[in-house]
Image: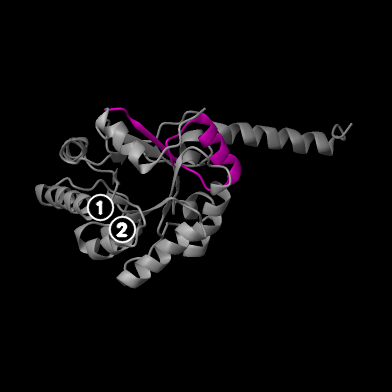
């Protein structure tokens, strides 16, 4: 029997110096595969906008879209901890909005926690969500929802000033009560420093090997994503080519009256 992963489990994994595995899912069949394979954390990311919905960034993703995909994933996930992203402008405007929208993701999306991008500049709203008894995973470094502000998908924390701000925000988030922090595209040395200083787990993406865990977009990892993927992504399969090949064979057999027989 597989162990049900909880927030407490992640804390225990960090304490035991055992790595945490996390991947994104946006639909029932993918989520079932991940859960059956033993992934610790399944994230319904706002990356759904780019991966599944064809948006140019995560910014257009709306709350109802996160809830819709989260409900599908929830039906498949039994053992993993299910976390869902709070989309752009669903938590920044006020404490009240942050609590209400996070609550809808938990209540209607049936997630077990939400992930919020931002540090010290949004700490009041983040703490309000936690005080409302909603678990929060933090997110620092490259924050895709701020892409228009930072001007591209670039490594963050390269200067001493920027690194110090990220470290400071990580400690502020921990003090506020977040149960883990995603570190996206920060230098490996900075990720190592933060990981060693925090008592809560860090989950890295493009931030090197010293984080307590790793997360990737599942479509990137499976090789479903077509075109360029981030340099830190490792493709563990090439399903896109296999699917194209199968589709071409199907079309050929239908046109040649070989299927159905």
In the rendered structure, the answer to whether residue 195 lies left or right of residue 229 reads left
Instruction: Identify the residue under disc 2.
Output: 130
Instruction: Identify the residue under disc 1.
Output: 177
Q: Are marks 2 and 1 in contact (CB under 8 Å)?
A: yes
Residue furthest to the right? 261
Instruction: Name the spot of residue 216 as percent of width and height, x first.
Output: 41, 39
Seen in the picture, residue 6 relative to 65 is either above or below; the reply is above
Residue 2 in magenta stretch: no
Q: Secondary structure at mark 2?
A: helix
Q: Residue at x 47, y 28 (%)?
A: 236
Instruction: Name the spot of residue 16 as percent of width and height, x first.
Output: 27, 28
Q: Is residue 89 visible?
A: no
Q: Nearer the viewer, residue 169 or 2?
A: 2
Crowding at dot 1, Cα within 10 Å, few <14 / some 14-19 / many 20+, comes out as some
Seen in the picture, residue 94 relative to 38 is either above or below; the reply is below
In the rendered structure, the answer to whether residue 26 lies left or right of residue 174 reads right
Q: Earlier in the sequence, mark 2 or mark 1?
A: 2
Q: Which residues are magenta?
A: 17-41
Residue 24 in magenta stretch: yes
Mark number for residue 70? none
Crowding at dot 2, Cα within 10 Å, few <14 / some 14-19 / many 20+, comes out as many
Q: Secondary structure at mark 1?
A: loop
Q: Is residue 137 visible?
A: yes
Q: Residue at x 20, y 49 (%)?
A: 170
Picture quadrant where residue 242 is located:
top right
Seen in the picture, residue 216 relative to 106 is either above or below; the reply is above
Instruction: Give the distance between the C-alpha atoms of the residues marked 2 and 1, in whole angstroms.
Output: 7 Å
Instruction: Name the spot of residue 197 as percent of width and height, x first.
Output: 15, 39
Q: Residue at x 42, y 36 (%)?
A: 40
Q: Nearer the viewer, residue 72 or 248?
A: 72
């Amino acid at each position: 029997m597989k162990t049900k992963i909880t927030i407490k489990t992640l804390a225990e994994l960090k304490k035991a110096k055992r790595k945490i595995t996390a991947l994104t899912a946006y639909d029932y069949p993918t989520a079932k595969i991940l859960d059956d394979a033993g992934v610790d954390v399944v994230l319904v990311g706002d990356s759904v906008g780019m991966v599944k919905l064809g948006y140019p960034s995560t910014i257009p993703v709306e709350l109802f879209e996160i809830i819709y995909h989260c409900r599908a994933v929830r039906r498949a996930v039994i053992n993993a901890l299910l976390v869902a992203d709070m989309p752009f402008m669903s938590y920044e405007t006020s404490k009240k909005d942050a609590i209400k929208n996070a609550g809808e993701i938990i209540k209607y999306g049936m997630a077990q926690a939400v992930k919020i991008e931002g540090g010290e500049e949004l700490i009041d709203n983040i703490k309000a969500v936690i005080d409302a008894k909603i678990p929060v995973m933090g997110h620092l470094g490259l924050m895709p929802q701020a892409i228009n502000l930072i001007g591209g998908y670039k490594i963050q924390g390269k200067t001493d000033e920027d690194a110090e701000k990220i470290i400071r925000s990580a400690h502020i988030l921990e003090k506020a009560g977040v149960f883990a922090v995603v570190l996206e595209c920060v230098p490996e040395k900075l990720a190592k420093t933060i990981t060693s200083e925090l008592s809560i787990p860090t989950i890295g993406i493009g931030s090197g090997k010293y984080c307590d865990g790793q997360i990737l977009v599942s479509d990137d990892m499976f090789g479903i994503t077509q075109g360029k993927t981030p340099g830190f992504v490792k493709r563990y399969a090439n399903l896109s080519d296999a699917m194209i090949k199968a589709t071409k064979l199907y079309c050929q057999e239908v046109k040649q009256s070989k299927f159905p027989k």
